Amino acid sequence: MQEFELIAKTFQGLEEILAKELINLGANDVQIGRRMVSFTGNQEMMYRANFALRTAIRVLKPIKHFKAKSADEVYEAVKQIDWSQYLNNDTTFAVDSVVFSTEFRHSKFVAYKVKDAIVDQFRETTGDRPNIRITNPDLQLHIHIAEYDCTLSLDSSGESLHKRGYRVQQVEAPLNEVLAAGIILMTGWQGETDFIDPMCGSGTFPIEAGLIARNIAPGVFRKGYAFEKWPDFDADLLDRIYNDDSQEREFTHHVYGYDNNRQAVEIATGNVRAAGLSKDIDIKLQDFKDFTQPAEPAILISNPPYGERISAPDLLGLYKMIGERLKHQFAGNEAWILTYREECFEQIGLKPSLKTPLYNGSLECELRKYQLFSGKYNEARAEGVEIKSDDDLKQMAQKRRFKQNRDFKKGLDEKDDKRSFEQRRRDAEDERMRDMEEHGGRYSRFGRDDDRRSFHRGGRDDRRPFRREGDDDRRSFKGGDRRGFKGDDRRSFNRDDRRSFSRREEGGNRSFGRGGDRNFGRGGDRDRRSFNRDGGDRKPRREGNFKHSFSRNDNED
């Protein structure tokens, strides 16, 4: 089979884990990028990547790289492609776009230009045109623009790969499956010991741990992929990949999930049953404060509440209790805790041996590793207990450099990059927002979606600027029916490190300043949409020419 370029997208911080997965699959020319890994492979590799990768969000097949400095240049480059080899007049398609550029400020406008180029080509050659369908199209296209570099790709995955298919129910704010699998792989655990999640929620960590321990591909629960609608789809090849369980293995230990919420325990139990892992995973109703030393060696990984629905005193008390339980009831093992509040980590009261920055949705979190031992830290070091391994020290140095050299900070030293530090920070935030929309939730720093108003980014297509003439629903500083800068009532817009409006009149100054920096973030995990799947205590298998269908979340990246 002929090899071609492929791109696997992932969350920031999981790129190296994804690259290792691809190398283990047999991919060639693996290159790590920002929230993506590029590689080469044939049709079978593309199918296997979608079916077997645990830390990939989607797999793209680039069909053209080009440079463009305007929307018209994008249009002309796309129109030069022979689209008859990908679709016809009866094929439906959709275009998704991600844009990071000072020239192209509106991603939807770029998507419209791609669509227009394809439609116009068909009109000129056939007199008819294919139709656009946002949900469940026959062909999903993806265009990525970074300044002037453009990449147009076919989306081979369709629905985001984090939607495994085993989640029949979920609690509020479930952990993303890709992030959960990435964290487990990051710890190095492959099923050598027992696995414990003392706050399991809907069971994401235990189920992903069970799949990793038995080396069961996450794709066995999927209903289908976008490439199944492509003209060159090979059903026999996909069936052969699907039914190959030769890499699966025995798991001689056990996975335990606990939660103090009875409903969460019931939901997690149902999800475990749907994943066919009831023999390997036990879900029990138990508060972490009642946690006791396990009889067998174990690893503990947990994603405790971050405080979005818990009062501050209760939250700090929770993390203090976590530290106490780990210190006195988990000696001789290692624990990994994911959270984003520094004060929560401080309440744990234990010294971490490794800190890894990760994004959980819009939240910039940290995953910290705790090597538990009896007695005091200094006494353990004196006795030769390995608190931080050489690998831990190396990883911490890499992560420290990562935090000190964020991508939006690096550009400050680039001569050809005219964006300010504030602009880069906002661009990075916009990128994270688009990723989160891809994975099942709708997030907005500005309150209601699609109504993002800004007081300082005038001229942005999707914001409301101040300097617009002839637009009655926007305020301008020009025109007779607007207030100008003349007269006794002089209004000025002053800006320092906080945004404020000061009004100067005769007799004194009045200030209408906001008392502090406002945070528009909607923190916390968000519910994701999931597909219900009939339960069962066994893994599904494809037989013969079983036809698949898939539906795509139209909010995806």
Image (cartoon, rainbow, N blue to C red):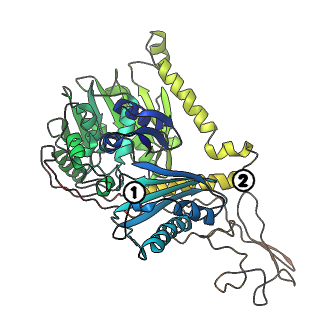
Q: In this view, does 239 lie above or below 422?
A: above
Q: In which quarter of the image is the N terminus?
A: top left
Q: Nearer the viewer, mark 2 or mark 1?
A: 2
Q: Is residue 358 above or below residue 189?
A: below
Q: Can residue 174 be seen in this view?
A: yes
**Outermost residue, front side:** 125
Residue 346, how many percent across, how many down? 50, 36
Q: Horizontal placement of 512 versus 489: left or right?
A: left
Q: How crowded is mark 2: few (under 14 residues within 10 Å), some or many (20 or more)?
A: few
Q: How crowded is mark 1: few (under 14 residues within 10 Å), some or many (20 or more)?
A: many
Residue at image mark 2: 420
Q: Residue 526 carries which label?
A: 1
Residue 415, how many percent across, how many down? 76, 46
Residue 227, how many percent across, how many down? 32, 53
Q: Is residue 225 above or below residue 33?
A: below
Q: Which mark is residue 197?
A: none
Residue type pointed to by label 1: Arg
**Outermost residue, top side:** 383
Q: In which quarter of the image is the C terminus?
A: bottom left
Between the residue at mark 2 and the residue at mark 1, the CA separation in whole angstroms equals 31 Å
Which residue is pictured at 42% across the width and 43% down the height?
A: 317
Q: Horizontal placement of 235 versus 188: left or right?
A: left
Residue type pointed to by label 2: Ser
Asked if labels 1 and 2 touch by Cβ distance under 8 angstroms, the answer is no
Which residue is pictured at 30% across the width and 58% down the height?
A: 229
Q: Determine which quarter of the picture holds residue 45.
A: top left
Q: Which of 312 and 137 is in front in this view?
A: 137
Q: Which of marks 2 and 1 is nearer the N terminus?
A: 2
